[in-house]
């Protein structure tokens, strides 16, 4: 896991180049994924909607089980690190729509189902927990759907983060907050702590946190805010006043991948402190096949 995080730079460069050459399909799009890939699908759907495009993200399993109301979409973009996730492949079969696949492997049993396969080959991983593959696919999606030139500087900026990632408070519970694209990344960040360090970690849309979850805050709570909007500012003071230790990380398009890497490194460090092997998370496998 750690080696792959540290080697993310080259994979990000590949993702940026591929995003410029291939991009993502035009028109109304249904984005599908499972686990980490579903969180990335949420990021993609949000960014597509920001550009005035009809887009929706769903867990692959929902589309697999209930395809009837989804066939009005023009196309599907499936996201799967392995390209073998059962729910995604069965969903694409059930929907019968033109489909793209964003993956890290150049061959697989379901590749024939997709009209276009985008392979982030340098992001391929051996580790069970997704790190480099997710951040590289995130860079791809950000570049393809925003065209931000500043994203070109990410690989160079990553070196600085890897040299001095900083450290974060330890707590009894961890919450990750964000809005827009940062909301999807917040969910991925929480999952990293859950599956790697086996700690209680949850993610919420920032403004939703006041609607019930706030009651869980105590002096043992650490809250990470992937801040991307001024409306989140009052929440910082509010949560600090309740005793939470609040960590603010930049959640804008140009910073999200870097903030995520800092959390990935924290998850790895926390797992080691707890006597766990982050390369062998409990009960998990590289790909889910039903």
Image (tube, helix red, strand yellow):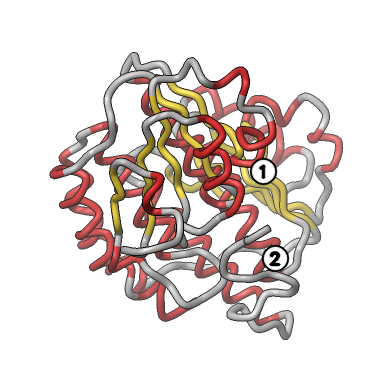
Marks 1 and 2 in Cβ contact (< 8 Å): no
| Quarter placement of the C terminus | bottom right
Q: Position of residue 7 (x, y in %)?
A: 32, 74
From where the camera sits, is residue 187 visible? yes
Q: Position of residue 184 (x, y in %)?
A: 53, 40
Establish if 266 lies above or below 86: below
Location of mark 2 (residue): 170
From where the camera sits, is residue 81 visible? no
* Inter-mark Cα distance, 1 to 2: 17 Å
In the image, which disc is placed on residue 14? Answer: none
- In this view, the residue in front, 276 or 48, is 48
- Determine whether the residue tagged by mark 1 lies in a helix, strand or loop: strand
Establish if 62 lies above or below 285: above
- Determine whether the residue tagged by mark 2 lies in a helix, strand or loop: loop
Q: Residue at x 43, y 44 (%)?
A: 250
Q: Residue at x 20, y 59 (%)?
A: 13
Viewed as shown, does residue 199 lie left or right of 270? right
- In this view, the residue in front, 193 or 273, is 193
Q: Quadrant of residue 129?
A: bottom right
Location of mark 1 (residue): 203
Q: Position of residue 221 (x, y in %)?
A: 76, 52
């Amino acid at each position: 896991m750690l080696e792959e995080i540290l080697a993310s730079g080259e994979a990000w460069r590949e993702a940026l180049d591929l995003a410029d050459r291939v991009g993502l399909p035009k028109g109304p799009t249904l984005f599908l994924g499972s686990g980490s890939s579903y969180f990335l699908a949420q990021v993609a759907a949000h960014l597509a909607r920001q550009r005035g495009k009809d887009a929706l993200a769903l867990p692959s399993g929902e589309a697999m089980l209930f395809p009837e109301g989804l066939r009005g979409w023009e196309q599907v973009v499936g996201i799967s690190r392995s390209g073998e996730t059962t729910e995604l492949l069965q969903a694409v079969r059930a929907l019968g729509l033109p489909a793209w696949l964003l993956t890290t492997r150049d061959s697989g049993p379901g590749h024939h189902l997709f009209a276009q396969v985008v392979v982030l080959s340098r992001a391929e991983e051996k580790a069970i927990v997704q790190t480099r593959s997710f951040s590289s696919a995130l860079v791809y999606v950000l570049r393809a759907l925003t065209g931000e030139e500043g994203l070109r500087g990410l690989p160079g900026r990553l070196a600085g983060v890897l040299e001095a990632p900083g450290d974060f408070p330890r707590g009894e519970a961890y919450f990750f907050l964000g809005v827009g694209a940062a909301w999807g990344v917040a969910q991925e960040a929480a999952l990293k702590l859950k599956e790697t360090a086996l700690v209680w970690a949850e993610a919420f849309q920032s403004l939703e946190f006041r609607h019930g979850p706030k009651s869980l805050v105590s002096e043992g709570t650490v809250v990470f805010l992937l801040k991307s909007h001024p409306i989140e500012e009052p929440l910082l003071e509010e949560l600090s006043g309740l005793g939470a230790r609040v960590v603010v990380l930049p959640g804008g398009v140009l910073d999200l991948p870097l903030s995520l890497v800092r959390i990935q490194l924290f998850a790895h460090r926390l797992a080691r402190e707890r006597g766990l092997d982050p390369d062998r998370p409990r009960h998990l496998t590289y790909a889910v096949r039903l």
